[in-house]
Amino acid sequence: MAWLLTIALEASADSEVLGRQLWALGTTGIAEVEQLDGPSLIAGFDDRSTADEAALAIGPIATVTAVDASSWATPEPQELMVGGQLLTIEVAQAFGHGHHPTTRLALEAVTRLASNTTRVLDVGTGTGILAMAAAALGAYPVVGVDIDPEAIAVAQRNVVNNHLEVEIVDLPLGSIERQFDLVVLNMLAAELAPIADLVADRLLLGGSLIVTGFLIEQREWVESLFPALAVVERSEGDQRWARSIFTSGPADD
């Protein structure tokens, strides 16, 4: 017997924060699913007591149900077609897959802005999905940086399994001295402020910065973190997630 913890995702809920909390609480796997009454986050547990403790920590939006153990496992690898190449992405405990609204927002921008003349930096690379998408489009060099050991391990396996040339590093952002034509930043808004200046410094003159992972109502504050850059595009995705694209050169009229 296994146990599922189901969390109804309200508009203000942050699935990435909840995901990290659930891993810390002992889940064996997480999936985000669309149900009739809206999106939910489902986490698996091996025993009832651990599931109940997690539900208590999450709050009243979480419910526990019993299931056959064979019906729950670590999330299956995701598949994504980019640049004519089918990418297989192991998720494991590194939160980041092609179905999350912020990842979709970032991917759409990467597929427009990355080419075989583009040098790309993916900050907070997670599973490496955005870095790999850029590499599949011919970008070189492509660097994915993260400080989470689990994310680094998963991203490195994904790069090897997909036969792509991507450098995955576990260095602090300030240790990367190179500059890039395209920087991708798909992180929670609360995590942006401490690294915003470092991110802007990694951008070459005329380069582009893709920022997502924040809600529509946080856009003004997020954009204020990059005063030296010009906003050239604003977009919105599902569940009130948003994206802004900046340039280090003058904005187009």
Image (spheres, rainbow, N blue to C red):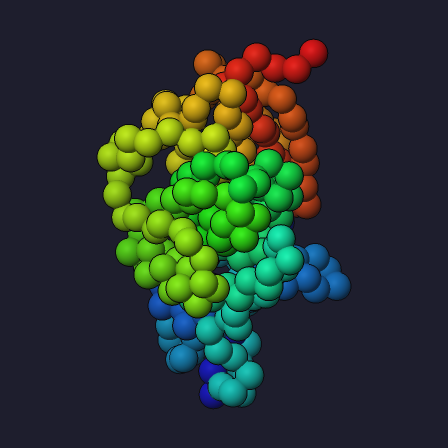
Q: Is residue 67 above or below residue 106?
A: below
Residue in the foreground of this view, choosing between 86 and 33: 86
Rendered location of residue 143, percent (x, y): 39, 44
Q: Residue at x 46, y 73 (%)?
A: 74
For this orientation, the residue located farthest to the right is: 36
Residue in the foreground of this view, choosing between 108 and 7: 108
Q: Is residue 148 left or right of residue 76?
A: left
Q: Is residue 180 left or right of residue 42?
A: left
Q: Is residue 14 above or below residue 245?
A: below
Q: Residue at x 53, y 66 (%)?
A: 88
Rendered location of residue 20, percent (x, y): 40, 55
Which image quadrant is residue 237 in?
A: top right
Q: Quadrant of the C terminus?
A: top right
Rendered location of residue 28, percent (x, y): 41, 72
Q: Is residue 206 above or below residue 77?
A: above
| Residue 83 can be seen in this image | yes
| Residue 124 can be seen in this image | no
Q: Residue at x 39, y 58 (%)?
A: 155
Which image quadrant is residue 171 in?
A: top left
Label total for image: 0
Q: Residue at x 62, y 22 (%)?
A: 232
Q: Is residue 90 left or right of residue 217?
A: left
Q: Is residue 23 left or right of residue 118?
A: left
